[in-house]
Image (cartoon, rainbow, N blue to C red):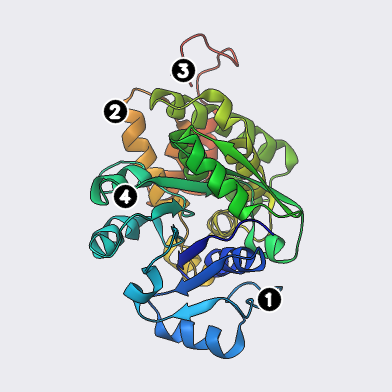
Amino acid sequence: MNGNESFSVIGAGAWGATLADLLARNGHDVSLWDRSSDVLDKLRAERQPFGVPELRLHDSVSIEEDLEAALRERDFVTLVIPSQAIAAFAEEISGLLNQQTVVLASKGIDTQSGRMLTDVLESVLQGLESGAVSGPCIAREVAAGVPTSVVCAARKREVAIRLRDAFATPRFRTYTQTDLIGVELGGALKNVIAIAAGISDGLGFGANTKSALLSRGLAEMTRLAVALGAKASTLYGLAGLGDLSVTCFSPHSRNRTFGELLGEGAHPDEARRQIGMTVEGEPTAGAALGLAEKHNVAMPITEAVANVCTLRMTPSEAVESLMRREYKDEFESHPHAS
């Protein structure tokens, strides 16, 4: 057991409940809050989170309906809510926090401002430290005890080390990173490429196509990340290539499944309804394109995904547009080349 810390986990969906359970079993004092009283009532009665049949929530996790009580006197506040709700939620809790470190476990880009989520948090919650936990971590596999490795990132190494030690278990290996923007971008952008991989599956394509999408997708993820100040090496680590791989191949990945439904001919509204959970890659595609245009970065796969999600192209037309692009060297000398 690691040294005792206190955590408030905000968001009792599959990943939030799984993290709360992991932290509690690791000896930490954990409260779990969600805006939905129905979700909390069900958890309190059954200790069974939605979407994670492998998990029974640890008895020591305190399920809180009062937000102020959930946040009070906690060392860390871990946000596991939809990325587009982060800005408004930061405003909501700005008067309730004292010295807590805010940990991001959501993955996306704020579509209103085009900013990284930790930048949004730090601009509202001024003076508080922020960090992120990211990597190839499907909730159901973590809950089942499948060996998993993630990155705990913060601009200050001592904060990253505290997070690393708090989350580490013999089945949940943690690494530290100080390239916070690279870790965030890896987690956000891989969801877009996973939609492309799912579209490939829905169209009936094979391993050739999906492997090419991963390789070229990683290239454009890295181009944008470097243009925004991240290290290229971060995108080849757990928060980039690792998370990209699991999200593109796992049958439990909601972004890949969303893409598969699109590839099979479903309207985006119907695909969202079938999944019933937030598909972060859809809004991220548009936000990433905005950043790409601003920084003169070519992101053809991301553009194709955005076009399919907004019905500007059919999946087949998007594939055709990618395959008919200008031929070129695989590794261009220009850092923003496609």
Q: Which residue is mark 2?
A: 294
Instruction: Say which amino acid is labelled 2.
Output: Lys
Tell me what residue is drawn at x 44 percent, y 58 percent: 75
Residue 53 marker: 1
Task: Work out which residue is located at the far top of the displayed protein and give it.
Answer: 333
Mark 2, residues whose alpha carbon is within 10 Å: few (<14), some, or many (≥20)? few
Tell me what residue is drawn at x 40 percent, y 53 percent: 102
Mark 1, residues whose alpha carbon is within 10 Å: few (<14), some, or many (≥20)? few
For residue 17, what is the image quadrant?
A: bottom right
Find residue 242 and report its horizontal and vertical position in percent.
65, 40
Task: Work out which residue is located at the far front of the displayed protein and give it.
Answer: 3
Identify the mark nearer the N-term, 2 or 4.
4
SS of the residue under disc 3: loop
Q: Would you say the residues marked 3 and 1 are in contact, meaning their CB atoms lie under 8 Å apart?
A: no
- Mark 3 or mark 1: which is in front? 1
Tell me what residue is drawn at x 39 percent, y 66 percent: 73
SS of the residue under disc 2: helix
SS of the residue under disc 1: loop
Q: Is residue 63 positioned above or below 127 on the image?
A: below
Find residue 3 and report its horizontal and vertical position in percent.
61, 56
Instruction: Say which amino acid is labelled 4.
Output: Leu
Cα distance, mark 4 to mark 3? 32 Å
Cα distance, mark 3 to mark 1? 44 Å
For residue 254, what is the image quadrant?
A: bottom right
The foreground one among 29 and 222 is 29
Cα distance, mark 4 to mark 1? 32 Å
Cα distance, mark 2 to mark 4? 22 Å
Q: Which residue is mark 4?
A: 121
Specify whether 80 is left or right of 296. Answer: right
Q: Which residue is mark 3?
A: 337
